[in-house]
Image (spheres, helix red, strand yellow):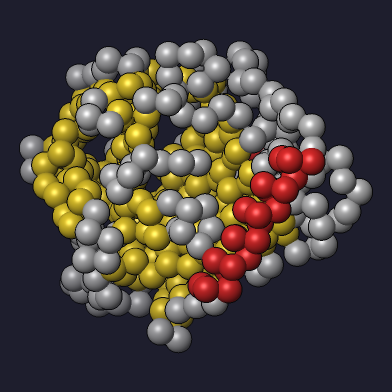
Amino acid sequence: MTSRRAVIAGALVAAFAGGRAAGAQVVYPAVTPRPLVFPRDHGSHPDFRTEWWYVTGWLRDETAPANAAERDLGVQVTFFRHRPGVAEDSGSRFAPRQLLFAHAAIADPALGRLRHDQRVAREGFGLAQASEGDTDVVIGDWSLRRRGETYSAQIVARDFAFALAFEPRAPLLLQGDAGRSRKGLDPGQASYYYSRPQLAASGTVTLDGRARQVAGRAWLDHEWASEFLAPAARGWDWTGLNFDDGAALMAFVIRDEAGGATWAGGAWRDAAGRVTTFGRDEVRFVPQREWRSPRTAIVYPVAMRVTAGALGVDLVPLFADQELDSRASVGAIYWEGAVRALRDGEEVGRGYLELTGYGGRLRI
């Protein structure tokens, strides 16, 4: 199946190249200051170049013994929408005006690595769609939807499946300046970006043919933009953390080829609901431990010390091998892992750490 998807992805790339030669130059809209409007902005924004809905979380297997060391699982599901800007003047229903990609993964300590699968499709034909009215993204039997205030994810993959519901337990968190998040010195290098921290997760995860009842906490990011990263950018480090007292932290650093920061930012909402937004000089990711992938030989800093303003936490992975190979869809190899947040050696929260650009410059 993976090789078949790789062939499909290659055919789409060839279609892009042909469309660029034949079609007019596409002008994507800029990310300018404007208020986000809901529920409309929960939905798709097809005029923009790139968009994603990203859910990460920790689940606890309710059917496992209370003292089982492998009771915890990490979960990740992402739907990407991409407007390649080709063949838009074509009358063909097969023209790839909008492409949809999806990744799903389970961080399974019993296996010691990610269970992972991916999908790619052009929008249309009743098989793949991203609704503009609200969150409703579908590729075949994979979906992420919002009904009322509840999100649901349905995934049937090669060696796992899950059916999960995510209920908000905290308000929506706008990132950056009222939902406009800068990513570089050029004001055009920005995205519209909001998060849904502290989602209560519940449902079933099926591993090796056995369905398990699970419950936990999750985090959703929705982001859309038109500009690529700055030319000097190689990749980024990002984290979204749910704290045990109800607080939430998002922080990121965009790195250059030497490992320095070209830009940084983030937001902290404390347990009382007060929000602090961090500027480019207030966020740091300091590697504490590295891990080398046995498959790609890429070295990732899988344990990090993250500081944002006066806040500091240590991130420790559920296990080291959480590398995700998406070359059959969006083309990147990166590390996307469940981590514990520690303060003075005590666990204070859980979330995910994302590390991109360590195997070469990230190309979106």
Report if residue 70 is visible in the image.
Answer: yes
Report if residue 246 is visible in the image.
Answer: no
Between residue 312 and residue 260, name the one nearer to us. 260
Q: Residue at x 64, y 44 (%)?
A: 82
- Give the vertical position of 12 relative to 285 (above or below): below
Left or right: residue 310 versus residue 222 is: left
Left or right: residue 364 versus residue 282 is: right
Q: Residue at x 43, y 19 (%)?
A: 184
Q: Position of residue 178 (x, y in %)?
A: 54, 18
Of all residues shown, which one is farthest toward the front?
A: 21
Q: Residue at x 41, y 79 (%)?
A: 207
Q: Position of residue 354 (x, y in %)?
A: 34, 45
Between residue 125 and residue 232, name the one nearer to us. 232
Q: Position of residue 115 (x, y in %)?
A: 38, 70
Q: Residue at x 68, y 48 (%)?
A: 16
Quarter of the N terminus within the rendering: bottom right
Q: How many marks?
A: 0
Of all residues shown, which one is farthest toward the left?
A: 344
Quadrant assignment, res 234 = top left
Between residue 245 and residue 264, name the one nearer to us. 264
